[in-house]
């Protein structure tokens, strides 16, 4: 009964917004909850995207972004969209492995990608070639518009680590279903933390290490509480997507949907380029802040990868149990083609 009520409420909201859009441009404002800070490359792309949509639709689609969980924490955004409390969200699917297992896989399977542009190609192909991705979003009352990028998540620690053995007992920030298993494979202790909790978590010792990119270390000032970066990529892939309520999406005109689709494609490419540029610029800033960069021996990295579970095989097995094995197999096939495995 509750789900039915929420669905009806969402449809009514979409109808009201559609009526508002056809009248005064400022009659309705679409609220977008973001888990990021405004000063990240992704945040700046989202501002550009919202401005472009507003201009291209003559103010008929007006999106206001609320940053750093002002409207809800990262793990609350899915429910907020489903309840009709917000219309859009920039949120990571890895926070919702049960509800969004297909979208969560590229956002959480570790040590399976190494370059930013691979994430662009992977998500474009998956959304076009694997029907389950859009079906999964629709079952959750949403549509994914585009995915943000991140520079490689390196091992960032308060104290140096030169081997897998050095990770034994260390508390490491994780998310989703698979990152904890990667940490545990190296003898570490997995601790789930949101982005807004990382600084305090390192400062207070809730975690000893986090997987993080060099540019986000600058954006979130992590260099103040952790001074050691190790050249081992623990994770790389698409990060938070911009999602829109399916009821709101269905309430747009064909022309509005075409404009948003085109600008979302442009935003993803713009995001990729800005993220790469931000990563290059961040290294000098971190060095100036006293951050030390360490090599992580190749043989130790190989040892860690060998200790990991078979993430791809487990994903296919789990989705097969849900009756979605064919799409899961296709997902991994495309993934391996993109990364060259």
Image: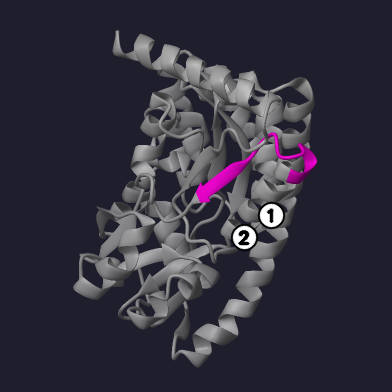
Residue 35, placed above or below residue 37: above
Residue 96 locus on image (x, y percent): 39, 35
Answer with left or right where residue 314 lies relative to residue 48.
Answer: left
Q: Quadrant of residue 229?
A: bottom left
**Residue with the most extreme front position:** 24
Kind of element beneath mark 2: helix
Is the residue marked by circle 1 packed among few (<14), some (14-19), or many (20+) residues within 10 Å? some
Q: Which mark is residue 219?
A: none
**Towards the viewer: 321 or 255:** 255
Answer with left or right where residue 201 lies relative to residue 268.
Answer: left
**Residue 165 seen in the current view:** no
Q: Quadrant of residue 172?
A: bottom left
| Magenta span contains residue 56 | yes
Label 1: which residue?
48
Kind of element beneath mark 1: helix
Residue 95 locus on image (x, y percent): 38, 41
Region of the chain picked out in magenta, as a range: 55-65
Label 2: which residue?
44
Residue 92, placed above or below residue 21: below
| Magenta span contains residue 33 | no
**Residue 24 seen in the current view:** yes
Name the residue rendered at 65%, 39% in the picture.
123
Residue 68 locus on image (x, y percent): 41, 56
Are the residues at dot 2 and dot 1 in contact (C-beta closer than 8 Å)? yes
Marks 2/1: CA–CA distance: 6 Å
Residue 81 locus on image (x, y percent): 44, 30
Is the residue marked by circle 2 packed among few (<14), some (14-19), or many (20+) residues within 10 Å? some
**Towards the viewer: 132 or 340:** 132
Query: Could you tell me which quadrant the N terminus lies in?
Result: top left
Name the residue rendered at 72%, 61% in the picture.
273
């Amino acid at each position: 009964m509750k789900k039915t009520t929420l669905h009806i409420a969402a449809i009514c909201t979409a109808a009201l917004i559609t009526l508002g859009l056809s009248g005064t441009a400022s009659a309705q404002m679409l609220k977008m909850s973001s888990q990021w800070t405004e000063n990240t490359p992704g945040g700046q792309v989202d501002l550009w995207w919202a401005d472009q949509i507003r201009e291209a639709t003559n103010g008929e689609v007006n999106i206001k972004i609320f940053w750093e969980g002002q409207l809800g924490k990262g793990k609350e955004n899915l429910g907020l969209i489903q309840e009709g409390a917000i219309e859009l969200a920039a949120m990571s699917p890895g926070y919702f492995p049960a509800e969004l297992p297909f979208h969560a896989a590229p956002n959480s399977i570790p040590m399976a990608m190494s370059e930013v542009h691979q994430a662009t190609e992977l998500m474009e192909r998956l959304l076009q070639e694997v029907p389950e991705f859009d079906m999964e979003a629709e079952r959750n009352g949403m549509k994914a518009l585009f995915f943000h990028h991140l520079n490689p998540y390196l091992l960032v620690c308060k104290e140096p680590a030169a081997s897998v053995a050095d990770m034994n007992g260390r508390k490491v920030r994780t998310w989703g279903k698979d990152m904890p298993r990667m940490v545990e494979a190296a003898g570490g202790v997995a601790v789930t933390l949101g982005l807004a909790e990382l600084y305090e978590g390192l400062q207070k010792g809730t975690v000893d290490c986090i997987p993080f990119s060099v540019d986000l270390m600058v954006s979130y000032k992590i260099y103040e509480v952790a001074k050691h970066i190790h050249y081992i990529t623990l994770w790389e892939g698409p990060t938070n997507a911009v999602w829109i309520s399916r009821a709101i999406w269905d309430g747009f005109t064909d022309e509005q949907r075409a404009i948003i689709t085109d600008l979302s494609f442009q935003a993803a490419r713009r995001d990729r380029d800005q993220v790469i540029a931000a990563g290059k610029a961040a290294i000098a800033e971190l060095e100036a802040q006293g951050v030390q960069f360490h090599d992580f021996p190749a043989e130790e990295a190989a040892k860690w990868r060998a200790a990991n579970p078979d993430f791809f095989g487990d994903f296919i097995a789990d989705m097969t149990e849900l009756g979605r094995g064919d799409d899961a197999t296709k997902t991994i096939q495309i993934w391996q083609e993109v990364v060259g495995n």
